[in-house]
Every structure is written in C-alpha cells, then in structure tokens.
Image (cartoon, grey):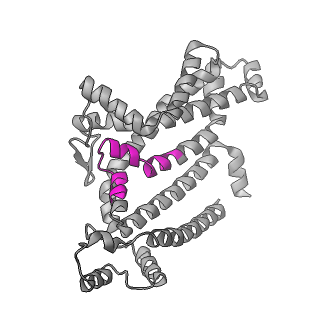
Amino acid sequence: MITWLLRRLFQALLVVLAMTVIVFIGVNVIGDPVEILISPDADQAERARAIIALGLDKPLWEQYLHFLYGALHGDLGRSFVYNEPALRLIGSRMPATMELAVTAVLLSIVIGIPLGLFAGLKPNSFFGRAAMAGSILGFSLPTFWVGLMLIMVFAVQLGWLPSTGRGHTAELFGIQWSFLTRDGLAHMVMPATNLALGNIALVLRLTRSGVRENLTMDYVKFARAKGLSPTRVVFVHVLKNIMIPIVTVIGLEFGSVIAFAVVTESVFAWPGMGKLIIDSINVLDRPVIVAYLMMIVFLFITINLAVDLLYTVLDPRVRLETKE
C-alpha cells in the first residue's frame, strides 16, 4: 500500500511538472499585456520601463525558470493589475467558489442517487420515466440560459430570491462564508442549483444504469434466494457495487464544477475564482492566469488521488491489487 501510494505521488509530481511547462508557455505566447496595461499614448521609454517592471524583458526560458523557482517556494508571481501575490488573490476568491461547488456536488448526491435508484428499480413507472426525462433536460439546457431563467422567475417575477451577489457573510476560521447567514444562503440557492443540474442528471443516469445492470447479477439472485429483504439487497449489496463509477464521476465533476464555474459566477455576479479568471484574461494578467490553471491542475490531481484511495475502501479487490 505504501509503495503504491508513493508511486502515485511520484506520478502526480511528474504531471504537475509537465503542466507547469505547458501552462506557462501557453499563456506567455498569447498577447502582450503591456499593450493593455499602459496608456496608448505612452512613449517607448515608458513602454520599456513597464516591460522591465513586469519581468517581460527576459527570455521565455529564463522567465519559466524564475517561475519554477518561485513555485517551489510558494510564490506564483504578482498580479500585473492588483500588484499583489497571485496565489493570495486567488485564495481570497476561493471560498466563494468552493462553497458553491460543494453545495452543487452535495445536491447531485442527495438528489441524483435516490432518483437513480428509484428509476432503476421502477423503470416503467411514471416517476421513473419522469426522472429520466428530467435528466435529459438537465444535460441539454445551456447553463447560462438556465441561470437567466432562474433569475427571471425567482428573482424578478416572484421576488423570492436575490438575483446577484454573495449576500452577507460570517467568519469561520478566519474566512468569510455565505452559508453561515440566512441572507448568504438565499444568495446561494440559484447559483448552486444552476451548477448542480447537469451533475444531478449525470449521477441519476449513472446510478440507474448501474442498478439495472446489477439487478441481473448472480450475487443479487443469491441474496434474494437467501431470503434477504429487498431493502437490504438494494442498499447493502447493489448500491455498494455501483459506487465505484459513481465516486469516480462525482470526484471528476467536483473538479469540473470548480474549474468551469465561470459561466454561473458571471451570470449571478458571484465573486469567485471564475469571475476573477475572466477579468484576468480580459487584461492578460498572466501571473493570475497561470496561478489559477496550476491550482486547478493540483486540484484535479488531488481529487484523483482521493478517488483512488476511496476505491480501496469500497472494493476489496482494489485493496488486494494495491498490496500486490
């Protein structure tokens, strides 16, 4: 087990190193931030001073080595626009995105798995067919359109929920959170629901297909022949055997929700990392863009490692393979 874990950590380190090269070169060969950040009326001397101040006068390979040295010491550069460490700037926006992402994933688990179980056990019932039809809508409807419709219905016409912003926050462990206040929770409802719809549909369909497949397996027939109750057969035997693909999808979708919450945060003016990266791209704030992408890479690698560890808990066969 220890050898397997060390091997995975080494592989993760190689992936992070490769991604630093791809991300840094990819971001730094696109556009010229000097053209955006300084006045069009600036003379050549002012342009030269700005290039030197931003560290863009050095060759690309030297800029990369400087970036890599700083990354090893926890420094991913300073923002061209805000003139503060990019990592600190992203960290200040991360709680807003994280609470949206965690809420969306919890909704997909709490709603998607029970609906998928019901649709798998009762595929020809009205509610089973309705759940499958709803999952198709969840996949098909564009996120930005759903967000606008939510605002129009629940904020403009009904007036039940606030349309934009994060609302009042409360401090916990030195960080401001929206879910700790009633006003913050009201502001979270629509963006979190908008983020969760696609994940609910995915988890629902995956759970349903797993239930339909496993109900025909020999171990289910044997469990029923032993006289086990239908509830025990479903929740102890069937659900446990279909959890590996569900855990995989939920883990990857959690990373995707964080990485691609840009649309939802833009529609609802949610002050998270997604809105920050859009603003940084508009002004070619390279340190912030690189720091954001590297943080997303590290997040996905951490999630994949956590999912692999969960495999060993859910499936004894995986534990045997890791021991071997």
Residue 260: percent from left, percent from top: 45, 49
Residue 321: percent from left, percent from top: 72, 53
Residue 22: percent from left, percent from top: 53, 69
* Vertical relation: 131 (above or below) 175: above
Q: In the rendered picture of this protein, how many numbered marks are placed on residues?
A: 0
Say which residue appears at 49% left-offset and 68% top-offset. Answer: 23
Give the residue furthest to the top. 126
* Vertical relation: 20 (above or below) 172: below
Whether residue 78 appears in this view of the structure is: no
Say which of 10 and 146 sits in front. 146
Say which of 20 and 112 sits in front. 20
Magenta stretch holds residue 268: yes
For the C terminus, the quadrant is bottom right
Which stretch did the figure color magenta? 253-279
Q: Quadrant of residue 305?
A: bottom right
Say which of 41 and 37 sits in front. 41
Residue 285: percent from left, percent from top: 34, 67
Give the residue furthest to the front. 41
Say which residue appears at 34% left-offset and 60% top-offset. Answer: 282
Magenta stretch holds residue 72: no
Q: Is the stretch drawn in magenta largely helix, strand or loop? A: helix
* Vertical relation: 324 (above or below) 214: below
In the image, taking residue 38 as reference, residue 212 lies left or right, namely right
Whether residue 144 appears in this view of the structure is: yes
For the N terminus, the quadrant is bottom right
Say which residue appears at 56% left-offset and 54% top-offset. Answer: 304
